[in-house]
Image: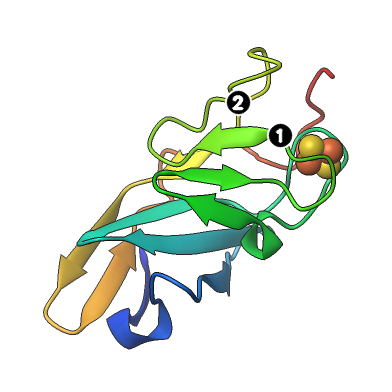
Amino acid sequence: MPITLPATAVTPTKPAVVQTERGFEIAVFQHGDSYFAIANRCPHQGAPLVQGVCDGEVVICPFHHFKYDLRTGRCRFPRHLRIATFPVARAGTDLSIDTSAAPDPSAPSPG
Ligand code: FES
């Protein structure tokens, strides 16, 4: 079941956090007309990525400044780290986040 939230809950300067039924958080970012949903937990040492700084389609972790691509979830360095990403669709005034194919972002990550 997708998670929905009002599109007004997210702005380019104010990301949002939603809780999933599976018990993990998703951070939702806006860049231009695009929305991105990622696991709100840095795989390095668990920082809440919603508190990071966005630079275009990259979020910079607030703890150690690793940079993650919001589209792919890939860390620029070290490249073996990756965050889960979730499809986001805008439907009228709402955003819908599909978590059905999501891996478990709370699973341990190397690094
Ligand atoms: S916790 Fe995110 S880079 Fe260290």
Q: Is 57 rendered above or below residue 44?
A: below
Residue 95: percent from the left, percent from the top?
28, 71
Report the quarter where the C terminus lies: top right
Residue 100: percent from the left, percent from the top?
41, 47
- Tag 2: amino acid: Cys
Residue 23 found in image quarter: bottom right
Measure how far apart labels 2 and 1 are at the Cα level. 7 Å
Q: Is residue 89 left or right of residue 70?
A: left
Label annotation for residue 66? 1
Label whose residue precedes the other's in the sequence (2 or 1): 1
Tag 2–tag 1 contact (CB < 8 Å): yes
Residue wearing tag 2? 75
Looking at the picture, the colour scheme in use is: rainbow
Residue at the (83%, 46%) spot, across then down:
46
State whether residue 1 appears in this view. no
In depth, the one of 107 and 44 nearer the eye is: 44
Residue 43 found in image quarter: top right
Q: Is 13 rendered above or below residue 24?
A: below
Q: Residues within 10 Å of mark 1 (few under 14, many from 20)?
A: some
Q: Residues within 10 Å of mark 2 (few under 14, many from 20)?
A: many
